Amino acid sequence: MATKTTKSRMRETDKTSRYPALCIIGDGNARLWGRMLGERLKKQFSEAGVGRFIVVSQAAYEDGTVIFVRGDAIIDQPLIAVLVREKGLVLTGEGTGGTIALAAHVTPEQGGRIRALLTRGGMPDTDLDLTARGPGELGANFRKSLRKREMPYAMTVSSADRATIEWRMFMGTYKGATDFVTKYIWPWPAFMVTRWLATRRVTPNMVTTVGAILMVAAFFLFLKGVWAEGLTCAWAMTFLDTVDGKLARVTLTSSKWGDIFDHGIDLIHPPFWYMAWGFGLEHGGFILPSGAMVWLLVVIFAGYILQRLMEGVAIKVLRLNIHIWRRIDSMFRQVTARRNPNLVLLTVSALVARPDWGVEAVALWTGLCLILHGLQLIQALGEKRRKGALSSWLDQATSSRS
């Protein structure tokens, strides 16, 4: 009778045998984001289920199919998944002299000619009976996890300078529906900081830890009515909150714990900042009636929690993130009562020396957004009842272009 360990190994072997092997052609020693391209490709294909990596001399003896890929290729993760899934596919992309083949999923018998093709560049001969497709022809433009529509990239490092490629990869990690600060103000400085951290092997969890310290510092500074220093810590924390996620994605160092750590902090802390700001008014010489303060904090806390619950209901019942249902929903997400837009309100109130207006503005905006999100959810539930299912305007736009 097989032991548990033996059975586990048999299951793992069976799982691996269902996936093609990976063979990297040429030199993969160039670096992007502090990682060699060969290491990056192995990591990407491993995440897509490929667990066997072979050298060229082994390819002819494979029982199953093989994915050959140029060692100087940069391929976006959605395209990796398509390559693994589709036998007979040749992925084309940008090369120094124009469009060339970057990778191919073929049989061992086709391997010799494919290796030669990838080495010299160019396009496959028609007698190989393979399907050559570029990034825009594979239906991988819509990214559900990032809530956006974007053309995946496939290119060689020599086809553009390293900074241009890294910028393209960095911007590809941004969510399509987010607040205006994250979308329009943070990208360039976050890119520069992320590049600096990546080359020094700083991990995303290190960045998140620093952000957590700044989050706590902002809370206590707000509580004491120290607005300038508190806002400095708060904005630094929100900036690092952008950096840690981008660093994890571009360096392929995302982890389950890191995701829980980062999103757990993001989920919990905002209403406590507003509460601390309200209680800190007394230290700054701004006294609000106790009853008024209670109601402001009730609106802020209840509004924040209810809006989060509405988002959860949308995902559970509608199977759709409510912020990407319609174009107007994605636009509203830029200013809805979440941390960064609310932090702008607090910052403006501090600049005009009326921090009491800040907490009042946050409460008012939270209440209005709660009403708007409630109407939005009611509309979505009604639409689902009529049509049976909802789809994102981003997904619909992708379908119309394909």
Image (cartoon, helix red, strand yellow):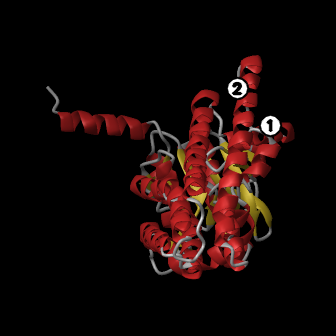
Q: Residues at badges 2 and 1 in contact (C-beta under 8 Å)?
A: no
Q: Mark number for residue 209?
A: none
Q: Is residue 31 visible?
A: no
Q: Residue at x 69, y 70 (%)?
A: 187
Q: Nearer the viewer, mark 2 or mark 1?
A: 2
Choose between 81 and 52: the one closer to the eye: 81
Q: Is residue 146 above or below residue 320?
A: below
Pick the residue in front: 253 or 374: 374
In the picture, the quarter occupied by the N terminus is: top left
Instruction: Name which residue lies at 55% across and 50% down.
Output: 301
Amino acid type, label 1: Gln
Q: Is residue 172 left or right of residue 260?
A: right
Measured from the top left, where is residue 169 in percent x and y? Answer: 66, 65
Q: Which quadrant holds residue 27?
A: bottom right
Taking the spot 46% from the left edge, 62% from the top edge, the residue there is: 253
Query: Which residue does the numbered mark 2 point to in the structure image?
Result: 381
Disc 2 residue type?
Leu
Q: Disc 2 and disc 1: Cα gap in Å?
A: 19 Å
Name the foreground residue: 112 vs 150. 150
Give the secondary structure at mark 1: helix
Residue occupied by mark 1:
396
Looking at the rendered image, the quarter that the C terminus falls into is top right
Mark with earlier residue (2, 1)? 2
Position of 18 relative to 69 (above/below): above
* Residue 218 visible to an observer of this rendering: yes
